[in-house]
Amino acid sequence: MELEFKRSALKQLKYYKKKNPIAYKLIREKLEEILNNPEDSNYKKVKKYPKYKRARKGNYRICFRVDNNCIYIGRIEDRSKVYQ
């Protein structure tokens, strides 16, 4: 499987890498978990977007969908902002 990022998600990841390295580390760990097991039952569906699932890591959420042999990362945000 391969990861593909939406431009805004990649921008947010780069922001965390530069401004908040602890959050970046948490998000990277979760991305590796998603890559290893994208169909885990712990990932819940996003109500507004039924094709997307969400993964939690601390106060951060990663919204993604699995298509064929690719995982599309749609959003990476703090939990207070991700669903707006």
Image: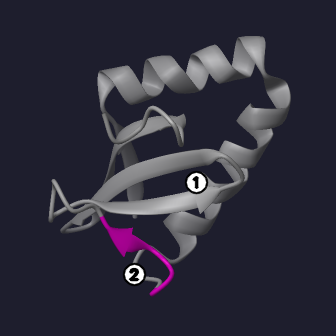
Q: Which secondary structure lies at badge 1? A: helix
**The disc labelled 1 sits on which kind of residue?**
Leu
What's the residue type where badge 2 is placed?
Glu
Q: CA distance from mark 2 to mark 1?
A: 13 Å
From what the image shows, is residue 73 above or below residue 34? Answer: above
Mark 2 crowdedness (10 Å alpha carbons): few <14, some 14-19, many ≥20: few
Q: Mark 2 or mark 1, which has the lower sequence index?
A: 1
Lateral position of residue 60 relative to residue 66, left or right: right
Residue drawn 51% across the image and 64% down it: 35
The residue closer to the viewer here, 66 or 44, is 44
Residue lying at the far bottom of the rendered structure? 41
Q: Point out residue 76 in the picture as x, y percentages from the top left corner.
A: 48, 37
- For the record, the magenta segment spans 41-45
Secondary structure mainly formed by the magenta segment: loop
Q: Tell me where residue 21 appears, x and y as whole percent.
A: 82, 26
Which residue position is annotated with label 2?
A: 39
- Residue drawn at the location 58% of the way across and 59% of the way down: 56
Q: Which mark is residue 31?
A: 1
Q: Residue furthest right?
A: 22
> Is residue 10 positioned above or below 84 on the image?
above
Crowding near the residue tagged with mark 1, few <14, some 14–19, many ≥20 C-alpha atoms within 10 Å:
some
